[in-house]
Amino acid sequence: MLRVIVRGAHNSSAARQALIEKIIRVDHAGELGADRIYAGQLAVLKGSSVGSVIKKMWDEEKEHLDTMEKLAAKHNVPHTVFSPVFSVAAYALGVGSALLGKEGAMACTIAVEELIGQHYNDQLKGDHLIL
Ligand SMILES: [Fe+2]
């Protein structure tokens, strides 16, 4: 079951809805970016020793993106207008980091996962919570 819980000083329903939309839109963009980065990395490193690892991580990101798609549909939240550009840029980042080799791809992955983890932790520590 997918649900969004908002707590804190968001007293009006309009403020709550605006916050829900903001959270879902930003988190969807993050998951879309992760999905596209791994797609780009796997396009380059598919036959390498890290191909199966990247594929596994990509599969996990597909689940995250699917969750955000469902939340966006449930709460009637449109994707950011920047999604097409963001998608291409993230794919290019994945390809570019993979062209640097396995180490480049993993460095990109670590940096992105740390950033996303920090973002979700900030959301949890803030005045709202998404589940
Ligand atoms: Fe994710």
Image (spheres, rainbow, N blue to C red):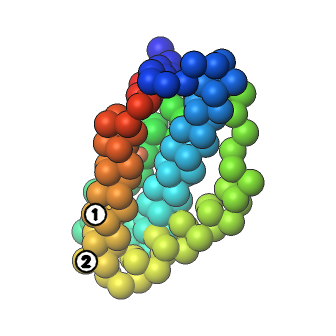
Q: Position of residue 3 (x, y in %)?
A: 50, 19
Task: Locate the C terminus and report the quarter of the image it occupies.
Answer: top left
The residue positioned 59% from the left and 70% from the top of the image is 89
The residue positioned 38% from the left and 49% from the top of the image is 119
Q: Nearer the viewer, residue 25 or 52?
A: 25
Establish whether ligand 1 lies closer than 8 Å to the Cβ of label 1.
Answer: no
Q: Viewed as shown, does residue 33 lie left or right of 82?
A: left
Q: Viewed as shown, does residue 49 lie left or right of 85?
A: left
Taking 115 as reference, is 41 above or below it?
below
**Label 2 secondary element:** helix
Taking 69 as reference, is 37 above or below it?
below
Quadrant in which residue 106 is drawn: bottom left
**Label 1 secondary element:** helix
Neighbor class of circle 1 (other Cα within 10 Å; few <14, some 14-19, many 20+) is few
**What amino acid is labelled 1 in the image?**
Ile
Q: Any mark on residue 110, and which?
A: 1
Q: Are marks 1 and 2 in contact (CB under 8 Å)?
A: no
Neighbor class of circle 2 (other Cα within 10 Å; few <14, some 14-19, many 20+) is few
| Separation of residues labelled 1 and 2 (CA atoms) | 10 Å
Q: Which residue is mark 2?
A: 103
Q: Position of residue 88 (x, y in %)?
A: 63, 67
Instruction: Choose mark 1 or mark 2, whichever is in front.
Output: 1
Taking 84 as reference, is 45 above or below it?
below
Q: Nearer the viewer, residue 92 or 59?
A: 92
Q: Nearer the viewer, residue 113 or 97?
A: 113
Residue 57: in sight, yes or no?
no
Q: Position of residue 15 (x, y in %)?
A: 63, 27
Quadrant in which residue 20 is drawn: top right
Q: Any mark on residue 18, and which?
A: none
Residue 99: in sight, yes or no?
yes
**What amino acid is labelled 2 in the image?**
Glu
